[in-house]
Amino acid sequence: MSPNLQARFFEAPVPLTELPTPCLLLDESRLERNAARLAAHWKDSSVCLRPHLKTCRCWEVARRILPSATSPCTVATMGEAEAVASLGARDIVLAVGIRPSLFARARALMEQGTDLKVLLDSRTMAQALADYAREQGCTFSVLLEIDCDGHRAGLAAQDPELVQVADLLRAAGQTVAGVLTHAGSAYDCPDVASILALAEQEQEAALQAAALLRSRGHACPIVSVGSTPTALLGTPRSGISEVRAGVYLFMDLVMEGLGVCTLDDLALSVLTSVIGGFPEQGRQPARLLTDAGWAALSSDRGLERRFASQGFGLVCTMEGSLLPGIRVAELNQEHGMLSVTAHPDEEVRETLMQLRADSRLRILPNHACATAMMHQSFYLVRNNRAVALLPRFGGW
Amino acid sequence: MSPNLQARFFEAPVPLTELPTPCLLLDESRLERNAARLAAHWKDSSVCLRPHLKTCRCWEVARRILPSATSPCTVATMGEAEAVASLGARDIVLAVGIRPSLFARARALMEQGTDLKVLLDSRTMAQALADYAREQGCTFSVLLEIDCDGHRAGLAAQDPELVQVADLLRAAGQTVAGVLTHAGSAYDCPDVASILALAEQEQEAALQAAALLRSRGHACPIVSVGSTPTALLGTPRSGISEVRAGVYLFMDLVMEGLGVCTLDDLALSVLTSVIGGFPEQGRQPARLLTDAGWAALSSDRGLERRFASQGFGLVCTMEGSLLPGIRVAELNQEHGMLSVTAHPDEEVRETLMQLRADSRLRILPNHACATAMMHQSFYLVRNNRAVALLPRFGGW
């Protein structure tokens, strides 16, 4: 394993007061609980869990949730695929549409023994892939992307082009490994009932597309669905072979807002130092400044149309207790501006009045993927002490 | 110089079709023109330009704008300060409030011969710094932050606490190097006249604060102002000793929206591949998918209340010609969703209909600092060919 991707466990647990700020904290027990929840939801099905590593981008986290290093996983970039392959992964889905500038890198991974499956949803791209494969004398394993909800990409489950693309690939000697869909519109669901309905729609689209392809002689072994809300709440149907999810490991304010989890499930937070706005001379603090700007939190506004009151994040004590009445109201690059309601609870008021030059707070992020992306590593936290530094991999 | 921060110039210019995507392009001639513009604006004053390197985070760019490696510069994090010090910088302002967890690193930089100036705006932090300095037997050089516009941080120019903080530092044997203010509310200015007025207000606040401190026996040699809009448009006043700006080197859609520059000044763009939504079978393309999601562009919405039509970025051909009627409408982590108006210009329509599997576009970002932050390096572009790979430094 590349040394700079290796977790570094500390000889003794480190108090949070001794960590540099801003930094990313990952609560170990919540991570484990979140991982166990998805596994339990699908345990009676024959489905294979294929965790999406784009959220954690961390091999130590992946190893804790994968049955073995070579178990199926999902990534979002070729850089992530190369990183996990170098760490031992052997069965990888690259779940963002392939493009010609990645063909050579995909081939290199396959030549090194990785079962890499690439994704596409157009004859344009299928033809380009087939042309490249013919030139190079190689065989790609291809998943066809299905659009289950008009969210982003993919062909409709009944689109005749789906069969045309599959036929084109087969004729060019390529492997049609199956179909993949992603219910990205789960983030727009107004309630849990809508998520349940969307999960059904997601599975139905994948099953329909697979049935269509099979009726034309394509074996279509993989039928892959997933998004954290639909994977955690949907009712498993027979015929689905794989489920993908990523943010379920960390959870965030978006997932809490959707009703997928509670605030107590949020495993990821940003540790920050108060750098200004101290309540000096008994003044009521109205505007606290921290060192966690968008460079540490991202500019992701989450579900702001529905949860505007959360701003760019909710605020906790260093130990993780929520401070009601405070939110991250504005962000600059390296400044977080916390706003305090005029009349916070007595307990919150007490906490604020005790802020000193070395005081620290924790921010619960809107969007775990986006916040994690701003950091090179996490501190793994056990009982409010850091026990390890976990490097993140990534890039394109 | 650390080899991984060294620019790598290519033996021959590389066509943009051969670069991996998504990637960051930096147009050399626009960079040079933007740098020259700020220098020209202040050339008749005795002001020292102290470029803010938080935008570029790149020593090759810094070296092109600094008179020498040891010339004054500004940074936003201790990690940036340590990086530029290791590269030869000797006169550094850390323009975000200092906090105790950084005291030891600041001292280490000073002991290595760097003239590092730190920033604070409260007795709380001044006392913590003084206590640390006494324990360690060291002397910090401190700038006092002045609030010129209620934007973020600082003490009002006439706040009695300003003198108290300065006196506290002096009594503790620390150096009061001067005052610093930042007209961050320039981003809220409705027109250029407002920016001009704000620039005057910014300079006035800094001059007033310096006068107050001098009346109490503090020499206050540094009187530092800056933000890209006020630095480029404001009328220089006597007594201002330093001007800071960062985004002026790259410009972006926010600066264009504020009237500070034109679209032709934008030096930074993201090169992206089209991965889906091809206009096959003569269909009108309505939703193009690219590989530049928020992981490549950031989630920064710029001045969305004023320029909602720009979405997350404007779209150009690979060569940089604007495609009117197209914008980045939505972003996922690794997907950019471009929306096309129902009736684009004939020329734009033509361009879209010619999209192939290996087609590339360029995205002009809302906020150059935020977009650049998502990348480890730039490609320096001369005449639409990449001539070098420039690594970025950073971290906290």
Image: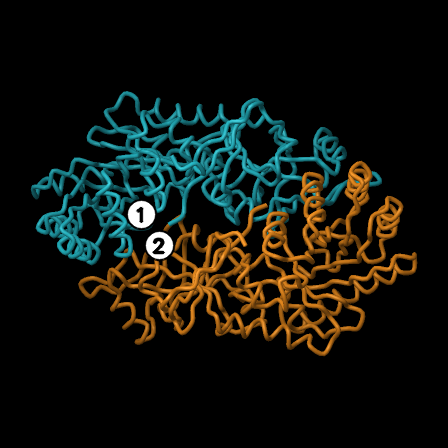
Chain colours: A cyan, B orange
Which x, y percent locates residue A17?
66, 31
Q: Which residue is mark 2?
A: B291
Sort mark 2 into few (<14), some (14-19) or many (20+) by Cα contacts within 10 Å: many
- In the shown orientation, is residue B323 left or right of residue A71? right
- In the shown orientation, is residue A248 left or right of residue A176? right
Kindly report the distance in space between the C-alpha atoms of the residues bearing marks 2 and 1. 8 Å
Which x, y percent locates residue B174?
83, 48
Mark 2 secondary-structure assignment: loop
Which x, y percent locates residue A336?
63, 46
Q: Amino acid at mark 2?
A: Asp
Q: Amino acid at mark 1?
A: Val
Circle 1 chain: A
Residues marked 2 and 1, same chain: no
Q: Does any portion of residue A41 appear in the rendered image?
A: yes
Q: Is B265 drawn above or below residue A114 in the view shown? A: below
- Which of the pair A199/B92 is nearer the observer? B92
Q: Which residue is mark 1?
A: A96
- In the shown orientation, is residue A371 left or right of residue B122? left
Residue that appears at 80% across and 44% down: B126
Residue that appears at 85% across and 51% down: B166
